[in-house]
Image (cartoon, helix red, strand yellow):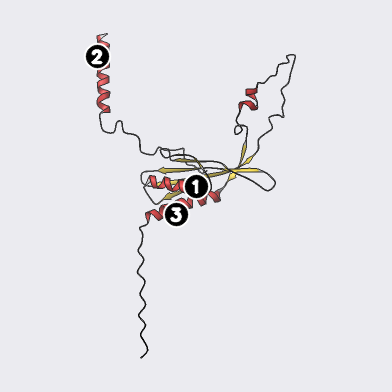
């Protein structure tokens, strides 16, 4: 056992020395790369390198239209609560969205995606279980409604992207960053009117 314990002890000492180096146990603060930003997002390059400011601006920009379900600053992803409304005729429609803030090191990109979906839950009662010689049902409650939450029983069919709302949210993010980046300008003092003189 002695030859086996000696290399193991050396390995433990080496790993302890490595962890003693600066930064070994420090938390990860650099934003992780989120899911790839593809053509399904509307993007803009922000006039800042301040990642925290960009993320805060994105959170503020979406609150006019959505509630935030989660905001992961490390991943750079803001998930939005679906916003539902009813069209003329009674069709249920909702908007689902996501905002991604990505730092490349040289600049920061904001990406917005808003999808419009139509309620289209199929009737799961259309096909009834069949019975043969065995009179026991072929399905159990867990296979039917009882096994699902109301949200899980709903099916929403994607229709199209709401590019107008994407542009509006993205514009608000860009404007907020530009206001922070531009230094405040001092307005020149207004000229004082000359004192009126009494007629001679």
The disc, 1 or 2, on the residue closer to the chain's N-terminal end is: 2
Picture quadrant of residue 185 = bottom left
Please give left or right for residue 113 compared with residue 57 in the image.
Answer: right
Rendered view: 139 above or below 179: above
Residue count near mark 3 (Cα–Cα under 10 Å), binned few <14, some 14–19, many ≥20:
some
Q: Which residue is disc 1 drawn over?
A: 62
Give the label, 1 or 2, closer to the camera: 1
Image quadrant in which you'd find residue 121 = top right
The residue carrying mark 2 is 6
Query: Residue 126, percent across and down?
Result: 72, 29
Which residue bears the numbered disc 3? 175
- Alpha carbon distance from label 2 to label 3: 63 Å
Q: How many marks?
A: 3
Q: Which mark is residue 119?
A: none
Q: Position of residue 130 (x, y in %)?
A: 73, 21
Spatial separation of the CA atoms under disc 1 and disc 2: 59 Å
Instruction: Give the mark, 1 or 3, whose residue is nearer the N terminus.
Output: 1
- Residue drawn at (65%, 23%) of the image: 141
Circle 1 residues within 10 Å: few <14, some 14–19, many ≥20: many
Instruction: Give SS at disc 1.
Output: helix
Kindly report the distance in space between the C-alpha atoms of the residues bearing marks 1 and 3.
13 Å
Disc 2 is placed on an element classified as helix
């Amino acid at each position: 056992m002695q030859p086996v314990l000696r290399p193991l002890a050396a390995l433990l000492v080496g790993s302890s020395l490595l962890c003693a180096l600066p930064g070994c146990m420090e938390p990860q603060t650099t934003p992780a790369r989120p899911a790839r930003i593809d053509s399904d997002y509307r993007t803009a390059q922000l006039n800042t390198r301040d990642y925290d400011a960009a993320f805060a601006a994105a959170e503020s920009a979406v609150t006019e239209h959505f509630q935030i379900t989660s905001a992961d600053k490390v991943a750079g992803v803001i998930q939005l609560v679906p916003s539902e409304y009813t069209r003329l005729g009674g069709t249920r429609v909702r908007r689902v969205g996501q905002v991604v803030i990505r730092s490349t090191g040289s600049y920061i990109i904001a990406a917005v995606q808003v999808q419009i979906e139509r309620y289209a839950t199929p009737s799961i009662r259309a096909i009834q279980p069949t019975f043969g010689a065995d009179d026991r049902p072929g399905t159990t409650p867990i296979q039917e409604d009882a096994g699902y939450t109301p949200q899980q029983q709903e099916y929403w069919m994607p229709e199209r992207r709401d590019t107008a709302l994407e542009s509006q949210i993205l514009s608000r993010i860009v404007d907020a960053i530009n206001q922070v980046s531009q230094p405040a300008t001092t307005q020149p003092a207004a000229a004082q009117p000359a004192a009126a003189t009494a007629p001679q």
